[in-house]
Image (cartoon, rainbow, N blue to C red):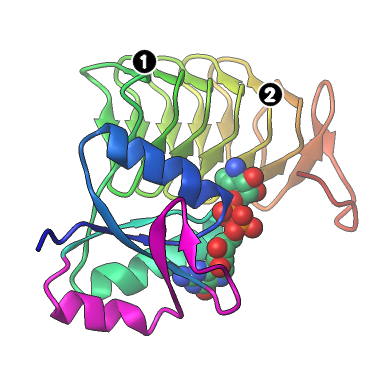
Protein backbone atom coordinates (compact mmCIF):
# COMPACT_ATOMS: atom_id res chain seq x y z
CA UNK A 1 0.00 0.00 0.00
CA UNK A 2 1.29 3.48 -0.88
CA UNK A 3 2.23 5.55 2.14
CA UNK A 4 1.25 9.02 0.91
CA UNK A 5 1.61 12.44 2.47
CA UNK A 6 -0.25 13.24 5.72
CA UNK A 7 -1.85 16.69 5.61
CA UNK A 8 -2.12 18.44 8.98
CA UNK A 9 -5.15 20.73 8.64
CA UNK A 10 -8.39 20.18 6.78
CA UNK A 11 -9.79 23.58 5.85
CA UNK A 12 -9.47 25.96 2.92
CA UNK A 13 -5.68 26.02 2.94
CA UNK A 14 -5.54 22.22 3.03
CA UNK A 15 -7.72 22.02 -0.10
CA UNK A 16 -5.34 24.27 -2.03
CA UNK A 17 -2.25 22.39 -0.80
CA UNK A 18 -3.73 18.95 -1.59
CA UNK A 19 -4.21 20.07 -5.20
CA UNK A 20 -0.66 21.47 -5.34
CA UNK A 21 0.78 18.20 -4.02
CA UNK A 22 -1.28 16.08 -6.43
CA UNK A 23 -0.15 18.30 -9.32
CA UNK A 24 3.45 17.51 -8.34
CA UNK A 25 2.79 13.75 -8.33
CA UNK A 26 2.34 13.14 -4.58
CA UNK A 27 -0.46 10.99 -3.28
CA UNK A 28 -2.21 12.22 -0.16
CA UNK A 29 -3.33 9.59 2.35
CA UNK A 30 -5.00 11.39 5.26
CA UNK A 31 -5.83 14.83 6.56
CA UNK A 32 -5.79 15.50 10.28
CA UNK A 33 -8.16 18.18 11.53
CA UNK A 34 -9.42 19.44 14.85
CA UNK A 35 -12.38 17.65 16.39
CA UNK A 36 -15.74 18.40 14.83
CA UNK A 37 -14.47 18.86 11.27
CA UNK A 38 -15.93 16.90 8.29
CA UNK A 39 -15.36 13.25 7.27
CA UNK A 40 -13.26 14.05 4.21
CA UNK A 41 -11.38 16.99 2.72
CA UNK A 42 -11.31 17.10 -1.07
CA UNK A 43 -11.90 13.33 -1.08
CA UNK A 44 -9.09 12.62 1.41
CA UNK A 45 -10.15 10.72 4.57
CA UNK A 46 -10.04 12.98 7.59
CA UNK A 47 -8.88 11.96 11.07
CA UNK A 48 -9.70 14.08 14.09
CA UNK A 49 -6.98 14.99 16.61
CA UNK A 50 -3.20 15.23 16.43
CA UNK A 51 -2.80 12.05 18.50
CA UNK A 52 -3.25 10.20 15.17
CA UNK A 53 0.15 11.48 14.00
CA UNK A 54 2.17 9.14 16.21
CA UNK A 55 0.15 6.09 15.07
CA UNK A 56 0.52 7.00 11.39
CA UNK A 57 4.27 7.43 11.85
CA UNK A 58 4.56 3.98 13.45
CA UNK A 59 2.45 2.58 10.57
CA UNK A 60 5.22 3.71 8.20
CA UNK A 61 4.04 7.11 6.97
CA UNK A 62 7.08 9.35 6.56
CA UNK A 63 5.97 12.54 4.78
CA UNK A 64 3.74 15.32 6.08
CA UNK A 65 2.65 18.79 5.11
CA UNK A 66 1.20 21.34 7.56
CA UNK A 67 -1.63 23.11 5.71
CA UNK A 68 -2.86 25.61 8.28
CA UNK A 69 -3.05 29.33 7.58
CA UNK A 70 -2.36 30.48 11.15
CA UNK A 71 1.40 31.11 11.19
CA UNK A 72 1.99 30.28 14.86
CA UNK A 73 -0.14 27.12 14.81
CA UNK A 74 1.53 25.97 11.59
CA UNK A 75 4.92 26.29 13.27
CA UNK A 76 3.80 24.41 16.41
CA UNK A 77 2.24 21.53 14.46
CA UNK A 78 5.32 21.28 12.22
CA UNK A 79 7.50 20.92 15.33
CA UNK A 80 5.18 18.15 16.56
CA UNK A 81 5.36 16.31 13.22
CA UNK A 82 9.13 16.56 12.78
CA UNK A 83 9.59 15.56 16.43
CA UNK A 84 7.75 12.33 15.57
CA UNK A 85 10.11 11.76 12.64
CA UNK A 86 8.00 13.05 9.73
CA UNK A 87 9.78 14.73 6.81
CA UNK A 88 8.03 17.91 5.64
CA UNK A 89 7.49 18.09 1.86
CA UNK A 90 6.95 21.26 -0.17
CA UNK A 91 3.67 22.02 -1.97
CA UNK A 92 4.77 24.02 -5.00
CA UNK A 93 2.55 24.76 -7.98
CA UNK A 94 3.94 23.70 -11.36
CA UNK A 95 2.68 27.11 -12.45
CA UNK A 96 4.87 29.08 -10.04
CA UNK A 97 8.08 30.61 -11.40
CA UNK A 98 11.00 30.00 -9.05
CA UNK A 99 14.55 31.10 -9.84
CA UNK A 100 17.09 28.27 -9.93
CA UNK A 101 19.17 30.34 -7.51
CA UNK A 102 16.39 30.70 -4.94
CA UNK A 103 16.80 28.61 -1.77
CA UNK A 104 13.64 26.91 -0.57
CA UNK A 105 13.04 25.67 2.98
CA UNK A 106 10.94 22.69 4.02
CA UNK A 107 7.17 22.59 4.40
CA UNK A 108 6.82 25.58 2.06
CA UNK A 109 3.68 26.31 -0.01
CA UNK A 110 3.98 28.24 -3.28
CA UNK A 111 0.72 28.77 -5.15
CA UNK A 112 -0.03 29.23 -8.84
CA UNK A 113 1.28 32.39 -10.46
CA UNK A 114 3.74 33.18 -7.68
CA UNK A 115 7.18 34.44 -8.75
CA UNK A 116 10.34 34.06 -6.66
CA UNK A 117 13.37 35.74 -8.20
CA UNK A 118 17.14 35.32 -8.06
CA UNK A 119 18.96 34.61 -4.80
CA UNK A 120 15.83 34.80 -2.67
CA UNK A 121 15.64 32.64 0.46
CA UNK A 122 12.26 31.21 1.47
CA UNK A 123 12.18 29.99 5.07
CA UNK A 124 10.68 26.74 6.31
CA UNK A 125 6.85 26.69 6.46
CA UNK A 126 6.45 29.94 4.50
CA UNK A 127 3.41 30.49 2.27
CA UNK A 128 3.89 32.40 -0.98
CA UNK A 129 0.29 32.62 -2.04
CA UNK A 130 -1.44 32.95 -5.41
CA UNK A 131 0.13 35.57 -7.71
CA UNK A 132 2.44 36.90 -4.98
CA UNK A 133 5.91 37.98 -6.07
CA UNK A 134 9.24 38.10 -4.28
CA UNK A 135 11.89 39.95 -6.26
CA UNK A 136 15.64 39.30 -6.14
CA UNK A 137 17.40 38.74 -2.80
CA UNK A 138 14.17 38.50 -0.81
CA UNK A 139 14.42 36.87 2.62
CA UNK A 140 11.17 35.36 3.83
CA UNK A 141 11.23 34.21 7.44
CA UNK A 142 10.06 30.90 8.86
CA UNK A 143 6.26 30.46 8.79
CA UNK A 144 5.72 33.88 7.20
CA UNK A 145 2.77 34.28 4.80
CA UNK A 146 2.74 36.52 1.72
CA UNK A 147 -0.94 36.60 0.77
CA UNK A 148 -2.38 36.61 -2.77
CA UNK A 149 -1.29 39.43 -5.09
CA UNK A 150 1.23 40.87 -2.61
CA UNK A 151 4.38 42.21 -4.26
CA UNK A 152 7.84 42.60 -2.72
CA UNK A 153 10.51 44.57 -4.57
CA UNK A 154 14.19 43.58 -4.41
CA UNK A 155 16.07 42.95 -1.15
CA UNK A 156 13.02 42.89 1.12
CA UNK A 157 13.28 40.94 4.40
CA UNK A 158 10.28 39.50 6.32
CA UNK A 159 10.68 38.09 9.81
CA UNK A 160 9.28 34.85 11.20
CA UNK A 161 5.47 34.46 11.25
CA UNK A 162 4.91 37.83 9.60
CA UNK A 163 1.71 38.12 7.54
CA UNK A 164 1.39 40.45 4.57
CA UNK A 165 -2.29 40.68 3.61
CA UNK A 166 -3.80 40.52 0.15
CA UNK A 167 -2.27 43.00 -2.29
CA UNK A 168 0.37 44.50 0.03
CA UNK A 169 3.27 46.23 -1.73
CA UNK A 170 6.77 46.66 -0.30
CA UNK A 171 9.44 48.95 -1.80
CA UNK A 172 13.09 47.82 -2.17
CA UNK A 173 15.41 47.22 0.80
CA UNK A 174 12.69 47.32 3.48
CA UNK A 175 13.18 45.14 6.57
CA UNK A 176 9.98 43.94 8.26
CA UNK A 177 10.35 42.26 11.65
CA UNK A 178 8.81 39.11 13.10
CA UNK A 179 5.12 38.63 13.95
CA UNK A 180 4.04 41.69 11.98
CA UNK A 181 0.52 41.79 10.54
CA UNK A 182 0.02 44.09 7.54
CA UNK A 183 -3.58 44.71 6.47
CA UNK A 184 -4.72 44.13 2.90
CA UNK A 185 -3.48 46.72 0.43
CA UNK A 186 -0.82 48.20 2.73
CA UNK A 187 2.01 50.00 0.95
CA UNK A 188 5.13 49.56 3.08
CA UNK A 189 7.84 52.15 2.42
CA UNK A 190 9.93 51.98 5.61
CA UNK A 191 11.30 49.38 8.02
CA UNK A 192 8.72 47.87 10.42
CA UNK A 193 9.44 46.73 13.98
CA UNK A 194 8.56 43.22 15.14
CA UNK A 195 5.05 42.68 16.57
CA UNK A 196 3.60 45.73 14.76
CA UNK A 197 0.07 45.87 13.32
CA UNK A 198 0.08 48.15 10.28
CA UNK A 199 -2.25 49.21 7.47
CA UNK A 200 -2.77 51.92 4.90
CA UNK A 201 -1.02 53.83 2.11
CA UNK A 202 1.64 54.44 3.20
CA UNK A 203 1.34 51.83 5.97
CA UNK A 204 1.17 53.14 9.54
CA UNK A 205 0.97 51.47 12.95
CA UNK A 206 -2.53 50.71 14.21
CA UNK A 207 -3.75 50.68 17.82
CA UNK A 208 -3.52 47.10 19.17
CA UNK A 209 -7.31 46.82 19.48
CA UNK A 210 -7.93 47.27 15.72
CA UNK A 211 -8.61 43.98 13.93
CA UNK A 212 -7.05 43.63 10.51
CA UNK A 213 -6.45 40.80 8.03
O1 LIG B 1 -4.67 21.91 16.50
C1 LIG B 1 -5.07 21.61 15.37
C2 LIG B 1 -5.99 22.39 14.66
N1 LIG B 1 -6.65 23.55 14.91
C3 LIG B 1 -7.40 23.81 13.82
N2 LIG B 1 -4.60 20.47 14.75
C4 LIG B 1 -5.00 20.11 13.50
N3 LIG B 1 -4.50 18.99 12.96
N4 LIG B 1 -5.87 20.84 12.80
C5 LIG B 1 -6.34 21.96 13.36
N5 LIG B 1 -7.22 22.84 12.90
C6 LIG B 1 -7.82 22.73 11.56
O2 LIG B 1 -7.43 23.87 10.82
C7 LIG B 1 -9.33 22.73 11.55
O3 LIG B 1 -9.85 21.44 11.82
C8 LIG B 1 -9.59 23.17 10.09
O4 LIG B 1 -9.57 22.05 9.25
C9 LIG B 1 -8.39 24.04 9.78
C10 LIG B 1 -8.73 25.52 9.69
O5 LIG B 1 -9.50 25.67 8.53
P1 LIG B 1 -9.86 27.10 7.94
O6 LIG B 1 -10.50 26.88 6.61
O7 LIG B 1 -10.60 27.88 8.95
O8 LIG B 1 -8.45 27.84 7.80
P2 LIG B 1 -7.17 27.40 6.96
O9 LIG B 1 -6.05 27.48 7.89
O10 LIG B 1 -7.37 26.15 6.21
O11 LIG B 1 -7.07 28.57 5.86
C11 LIG B 1 -6.85 29.93 6.23
O12 LIG B 1 -5.57 30.35 5.77
C12 LIG B 1 -5.42 30.25 4.34
C13 LIG B 1 -3.98 30.63 4.01
C14 LIG B 1 -7.96 30.77 5.60
O13 LIG B 1 -7.85 32.11 6.04
C15 LIG B 1 -7.85 30.73 4.08
O14 LIG B 1 -8.82 31.58 3.48
C16 LIG B 1 -6.43 31.13 3.64
N6 LIG B 1 -6.32 31.02 2.19
Whole-percent x, y for residue 83 in the image: 25, 74
Q: Position of residue 38 (x, y in %)?
A: 56, 67
Image quadrant, ligand 1: bottom right
| Residue 208 seen | yes
What residue did someone put label 2 on?
167
Q: Which residues are magenta?
A: 34-61
Give the CA separation, mark 1 to mark 2.
18 Å
Closer to us: 193 or 152: 152
**On the image, which quarter does residue 149 sit in?**
top right
Camera-side mark, 1 or 2: 2
Q: Residue at x 61, y 24 (%)?
A: 150
* Mark 1 or 2, nearer chain start: 1
Q: Is residue 14 left or right of residue 95?
A: right
- Asked if residue 43 lies in the magenta stretch, the reply is yes
Check the picture and name the quadrant holding the N terminus: bottom left
Q: Which residue is mark 1?
A: 117
Residue shown at 44%/24% (left/top)?
Answer: 112
Q: In the shown orientation, is residue 110 left or right of residue 28?
A: right
Q: What residue is drawn where x is 54% and y is 41%?
A: 145
Classify 124 as above or below 130: below
31 horizontally vs 54: left or right:
right
Residue 126 visible, this angle:
no
Q: Is residue 193 above or below residue 48?
A: above
Instruction: Establish if 42 lies above or below 81.
Output: above
Where residue 116 sits, quadrant-wise, is top left
| Tag 2 secondary structure | loop
Q: Residues within 10 Å of mark 1 (few under 14, many from 20)?
A: many
* Image coordinates for residue 176, horizontal then vertical, percent: 59, 36
**Percent of width and height locating residue 44:** 38, 58
Compared across the picture, whether 197 is left or right of 58 comes to right
Amino acid sequence: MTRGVIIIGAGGHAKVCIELLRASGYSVSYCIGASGSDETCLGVPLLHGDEHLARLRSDGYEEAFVAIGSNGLRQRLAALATGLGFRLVNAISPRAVISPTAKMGQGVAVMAGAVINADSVIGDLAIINTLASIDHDGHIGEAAHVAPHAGLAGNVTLGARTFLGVGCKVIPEVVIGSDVVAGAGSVIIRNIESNSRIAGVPAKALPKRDMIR
